[in-house]
Image (cartoon, rainbow, N blue to C red):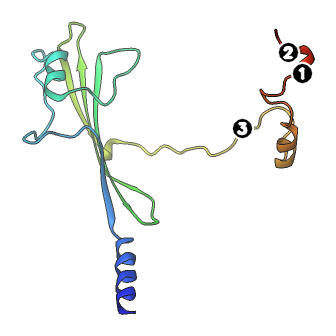
Amino acid sequence: MRLALALSALLLSTACVSIRDTHGYAIERGETELTALEGIDTKESVLARFGEPSVRPSMSDDVWYYISTTTNSRAFYQTETTSRDIIVFAFNEDGTVADVLEFDLEDGQQVAINDRVTRTRGKELSFLEQLIGGVGKGAGAVDPDNAPQ
């Protein structure tokens, strides 16, 4: 009985443990920051030193983003973002570094997500109408008289 009580107390206490996750670019051991010399470093040198960026815009390869985010989550609570670091490398037309910008969590903005649903045309079917209405209309339902030869 005591063992079961001790095990249940141990399991309940682990539910309160917070979990810290890091997503995105991870700074290598020995590195303290991502830096590049403007006008000297090139796309190739930045790529060799820091690896592939987290984000490259699809229309232009002149701006690279290295993004690192740390979150903290606990049991039934919503996950909280504790830090976010974004390093932006902007390149000139000749491929040299034009500017290095740094942003953090305080530079971000909260975006309000709209949770409304856009209605579609036509009739909304109930669960039973959807279930019964699909009978006989599947890919396996072929009329043997009109089957392709």
Please name the amino acid that badge 3 sits on.
Thr
Q: Is residue 59 left or right of residue 48?
A: right
Rendered position, 82 above or below 7 = above
Q: Quadrant of the N terminus?
A: bottom left
Please tell me which residue lies in front, 112 or 45. Answer: 45
Q: CA distance from mark 1 to mark 2?
A: 6 Å
**In x, y percent, where is residue 9?**
37, 83
Disc on the earlier residue, 3 or 1: 3
Which mark identifies residue 126?
none
Regarding residue 125, the answer to whether it shows in the image is no
| Helix, strand or loop for disc 1 | loop
State which mark lies toward you, 3 or 1.
Answer: 1
What residue is drawn where x is 40% and y is 18%? 58
What residue is drawn where x is 40% and y is 77%? 12
Which mark identifies residue 147?
2
What residue is drawn where x is 45% and y is 64%? 77
Q: Is residue 40 left or right of residue 112?
A: left
Check disc 2: other Cα within 10 Å, few if <14, some if 14-19, many if 20+: few
Rendered position, 95 above or below 109 = above
Check disc 1 and report the residue beneath it: 143
Q: Residue furthest right?
A: 145
Please name the amino acid that badge 2 sits on.
Ala
Q: CA distance from mark 3 to mark 2?
A: 40 Å
Number of marks: 3
Badge 1 vs badge 2, beta-carbon distance below 8 Å:
yes
Q: Residue furthest bottom?
A: 1
Rendered position, 70 above or below 16 = above
**In x, y percent, where is residue 11?**
38, 76
Check disc 3 and report the residue beneath it: 118
**In x, y percent, where is residue 56?**
34, 23
| Helix, strand or loop for disc 2 | loop
